[in-house]
Amino acid sequence: MNFSLEVMLQLAIVIPLLTTFGIIAAGKYPNIRESITITASIILLYIVINLYQNILLGETVNVFWWEIIPDLAISFSIEPLGMLFALIASFLWLITTFYAIGYMRSHEEENQTRFYTCFALAIGAVMGIAFSDNLFTLFIFYEVLTLSTYPLVTHSGTEKAKQGGRVYLGILLSTSIAFFLLAIVGTWFVAGTLDFKQGGIFDTNVDKTVAGALLVLFIFGIGKAAIMPFHRWLPAAMVAPTPVSALLHAVAVVKAGVFTILKVCVFIFGLDLLAVLPTTQFLLYLAGASVLLASIVAMRQDNLKARLAYSTISQLGYITMGALLANSSGVLGSSMHIATHAFGKITLFFCAGAILVTAHKSKISEMRGLGKQMPLTMIAFFIASLSIIGVPPTGGTWSKWFLVMGTMEAQQWTLMVVLMLSSLLNIAYLLPIPYHAFFSNTLGKEPLAQTQIKEAPWPSLLAIGITTLGCLILFVYPQPLFDLASAILAGRE
């Protein structure tokens, strides 16, 4: 059956949402419930790949749903940045589902039907964000994503989980309403439109002070990007099960944040205007401070998921910084880092969950010698760590290369030093974990018992293997990723 591109675009948004009904109906039958989830994720990935192939051929797709008032509608279109985000999210939904099956069953988690239902809702919201044709549409799905992931954060139902959920919901909703929505309304009044447009939507004679103030509202309002001081929701959300952490840190929430910042910088302000705004420099240094401070805090965390959470805050600062550099290399680096960080960080969280399920350990100090019992998991952790650091033979090398080039083009030498220092800090808080896992003769504080290899359940191990392979493939064959990132700037003089 051949569908038009317009129908396929809408199916990409609707299929995950419709899947929730099947998951709920099959709630008492785990095998059927999870088969529905896997089938839906495969169909979604197939549709997104088809859209991608047609976009490569130069096709354009626009879908109109509903006009609220004149010139303000819920509508969708496809451009390279959104395509990149949709490809990552749809692929990693499938992989995370395999991982979750092994994790949730081995950990004997309750409310698994609710978990898969909210997961599907979140992916549907991500597709809506990726293909939004204007800020109004994006804002709607941005809020749906916040609300659909709240039950995932509070999944365990403990008081600690509920407290984490309150911080999560409180910060994300308050920043959205107080800053993001205000920025959108201000943009509507100043520019007269909210449509994404290559080169930006503001007139060349726009008041730079007003535009600069709107930029500050956007950066602070897009709380999912976790720029300090609006970052506390991210560590608070670590009370969630590991598949949720993978969703938050690699597939959906934080990537929706930095994706939105890139969309605003490139398609609302435009790089030429962005470069001359009075607040851009301040926000660049704020992003740089987030990169360094979060890395320093990460070094002090003994809980593995907490360390990875602060690492994510630091890495998101890279993407925000690249967008605010307002040059081609910065946008290239930021766009590619959305993908390379996704594969690296989801692998690290998958490994953390595997260690918890198999060895029942969550503290780094207890993981010495663990590599002798879980060699595949710790090798994967090592490779993913290299990608986060940004060294060969992993994909993170290329995104960090372009980010450094962006700082040089903008003559932001301080920020270049920040990127270098951050990479050294990444080494300091990530590499000792696999090193001690393989080269220590104790398991935690106890002498190492007779080695018996015991890895995570095979669905989880399969997911870890695929994402680890992704980290390596993005180094050897980054061309499709580079082409998509380059196309974001197509048509710019």
Image (cartoon, grey):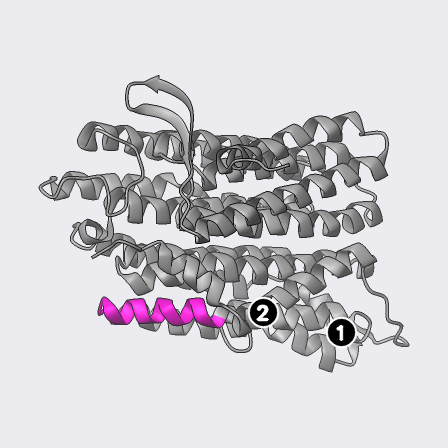
- Residue, far left: 205
Q: Amino acid at mark 2?
A: Ile
What residue sits 80% from the left and 76% below the top?
A: 372
Q: How far across and how far down the image is residue 335, in percent?
A: 41, 57
Displayed quadrant of residue 364: bottom right
Viewer-closest of 301 and 439: 439
x and y percent of residue 116 in the render?
71, 37
Residue 164 within the segment the image draws in magenta: no
Q: Residue 356 in the image: state x and y as whole percent.
A: 76, 57
Q: Residue at position x 74%, y 31% from top?
A: 23
Circle number at residue 473: 2
Front residue of 447/323: it is: 323
Q: Are marks 2 and 1 in contact (CB under 8 Å)?
A: no
Name the quadrant of the C terminus.
bottom left
- The answer for how far apart the CA atoms under marks 2 and 1 are is 24 Å
112 relative to 289, above or below = above
- Label 2 Cα crowd, 10 Å radius (few <14 / some 14-19 / many 20+): some
Dot 2 or dot 1, earlier in sequence = 1
Residue at figure coordinates x 67%, y 74% from the top left: 434
**Which residue is pictured at 62% across the width and 42% down the height?**
44
Looking at the image, which residue sits at the far front? Answer: 2
Against 376, residue 268 (above or below) is above
Dominant secondary-structure state across the stretch colored magenta = helix
The label number, if any, that marks residue 474 in the structure image? none
Q: Is residue 465 depicted above or below 451 in this figure?
A: above
Q: Which residue is mark 1?
A: 371
Front residue of 109 and 89: 89
Total marks in image: 2
Relative to 450, say whether 183 is above or below. above
- Of the residues shown, which amino acid type is indicated by label 1? Gly
| Label 2 SS | helix
Q: Which residues are magenta?
A: 397-415
